[in-house]
Amino acid sequence: MLTRTPDYYSSFRCLAGACPHTCCAKWEVVIDPDTAGRYEAVPGPLGERLRAALVRDEDGDWCFPLQGERCPFLDGENLCEIHRQLGEAATSVTCREHPRFTEDYGPFREITLSASCPAANALLLGSEAPLTFREEGSMEEPADHDTALLLALRDRLLAVLADRRMPLRRRLERFLTAALAAQDALDTWDEDALSALAAGELPPEPPRVEDGPGLFPDALGLLSGLEILEPDWRELLRQAETAPAAEVPEPLLERIAVYFAFRYLLKAVNDGDLLGQAQLCLLAVLTVERLAPVTGLGEALRRFSCEVEHDDGNLEALLEAFRQETPPLAAFFRQLG
Ligand code: SF4
């Protein structure tokens, strides 16, 4: 199996008890059935507490309901009692995997580190070098034709974002222009056009759009209408509507753009919606930039990731909004133009 990861992946270390935003609070963790089954046999007081704490959530999954917004097994030193007493292997798959997002594409998989995690966030924003990706292992069989084509297209779009010969705003515009052309070709399954785009024959100019408003502030309203994790999120978005623009270093914003594009574009293999995923990436980058004067850049990215990336319902709601043209595609181009 070939595994692809960002270049800082192996430097990740959980901050454990020193973490300022532990992942063991605010989120209710699903306990996978194997782990829940093993808790049946844990002896002693911890075993009794584990079994007493386990309940089914509304989806029928096992979970530990939060107590005072914290996992009931998070101790006074912000360490996991299950991990401490029984070892990491006794924790649930979700706990062991976080902050890793793993996407399985058959003969290869991709693992990213969620920017919601302070340690992963600091690694992403701790360098101004172009973000690159490493591969380990090999594919036992080639990726299927469609996946291979999308992979080549994503590589091209990542290269557009990383092309430091032009200002980032222009790169983001080229990224969206190329994604739009790719979507047209995907919709009619024009393989020649897709191959040409993947080979670097990109549209020279964005489409002409009529005058009108850009993405903001309406996009902040769209985000405000989603499910929220923390109650101050909507207030932060409201403050971002009027906050003066901050000078975010382009190399850092580029790394954020590449982080999102790497993670989301290839998901189009599931439904063919490459343009929607590209719009999601742009909304993320531009919102983080907009929020940076309110919270600081790292915190803006961390909060966006917590509120949007970790909620599948919110991700799907955004993709559906893009399909409904709310906000319209033209607003993205006007924002970048
Ligand atoms: S958020 Fe990251 S650093 Fe903090 S406890 Fe969780 S995995 Fe560790």
Image: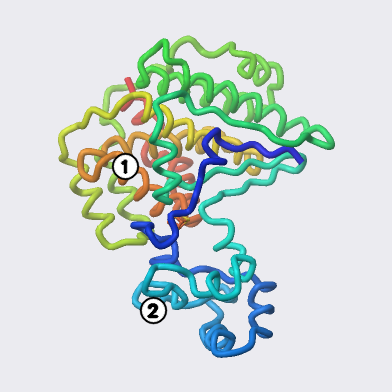
324 up-or-down from 195: above or below: below
Residue 156 visible (yes or no): yes
Q: Residue at x 23, y 50 (%)?
A: 236
Q: Quadrant of the N terminus?
A: top right
According to the picture, the residue beneath numbered tag 2 turns out to be 67
Q: Residue at x 39, y 66 (%)?
A: 26
- Is 186 on the left-hand or right-hand side of 162? right
What is the distance, in whole Å, between disc 1 and disc 2 at their CAs? 34 Å
Q: Residue at x 61, y 63 (%)?
A: 93
Q: Which mark, by number, is residue 68?
A: none
Percent of width and height locating residue 252: 37, 29
Kindly state the secondary structure of the residue where label 2 is placed. Answer: loop
Amino acid at circle 1: Ala
Q: Nearer the viewer, mark 1 or mark 2?
A: 2
Q: Which residue occupies the foreground of this view, 178 or 62? A: 62
> Quadrant for ligand 1?
bottom left
Residue 58 visible (yes or no): no
Which is more N-terminal, label 2 or label 1? 2
Kindly state the secondary structure of the residue where label 1 is placed. Answer: helix
- Is 143 on the left-hand or right-hand side of 249? right
The answer to which quarter of the image holds residue 274 is: top right
Percent of width and height locating residue 138: 77, 34
Q: Which residue occupies the foreground of this view, 253 or 133? A: 133
50 up-or-down from 279: above or below: below
Amino acid at circle 2: Gln
According to the picture, the residue beneath numbered tag 1 turns out to be 219
307 up-or-down from 295: above or below: below
- Is 164 on the left-hand or right-hand side of 152? left
